[in-house]
């Protein structure tokens, strides 16, 4: 995971072009999604983070975006609903 504030514009562009960065996330809400997501593009830079892949995002405790990653979100939601609830 890499914070947007820790990378320059040119470094970011290079890492996206090379495929080192494929997803963006909201550090406050713990949601990740596609770089092209309209919701993600409105995000404030100081809370934006980047991931190489879904595995990294999930291991960091993030969930899929319901807007741009609807099939992954539906799978995540069904797993959450099946999990035992703590009282």
Image (tube, helix red, strand yellow):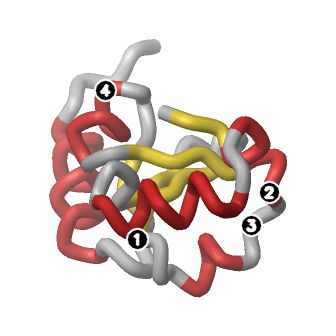
Query: Residue 59, labelled with which disc?
Result: 4
Q: How many marks?
A: 4
Instruction: State the SS at label 2.
Output: helix
Whole-angstrom CA distance, mark 1 to mark 3, is 13 Å
Disc 2 to disc 3, how far (Cα)? 6 Å
- The reply to whether the C-beta atoms of the residues labelled 2 and 3 are less than 8 Å apart is yes
Looking at marks 4 and 3 on the same chain, the residue that comes earlier in the sequence is marked by 3
* Distance of label 4 from label 2 (alpha carbons): 22 Å
Provide the residue designation for mark 1.
Answer: 34
Q: Earlier in the sequence, mark 2 or mark 1?
A: 1
Indicate left or right for 38 with 23 as reference.
right
For residue 39, side relative to residue 74 (left or right): right
State the image quarter where residue 45 is shown. bottom right
- Residue 45 - label: 2
Element at label 4: helix
- How many residues crowd mark 4 within 10 Å: few (<14), some (14–19), many (20+)? few
Q: CA distance from mark 4 to mark 1?
A: 17 Å
Q: Position of residue 20 (x, y in %)?
A: 33, 50
Find out whether the residues at labels 2 and 1 contact each other: C-beta distance under 8 Å.
no
> Which one is earlier in the sequence, the residue at label 4 or at label 2?
2
Identify the residue position indicated by label 3 in the image.
43
């Amino acid at each position: 995971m890499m914070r947007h504030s820790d990378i320059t514009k040119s470094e970011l562009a290079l890492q996206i072009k090379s495929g080192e960065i494929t997803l963006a996330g909201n550090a406050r809400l713990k949601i990740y999604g596609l770089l092209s997501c309209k919701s993600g593009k409105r995000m404030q830079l100081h809370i934006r983070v980047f991931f190489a892949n879904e595995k990294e995002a999930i291991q960091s405790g993030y969930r899929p975006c319901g807007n741009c990653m609807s099939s992954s979100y539906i799978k995540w939601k069904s797993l959450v609903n099946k999990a035992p609830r703590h009282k």
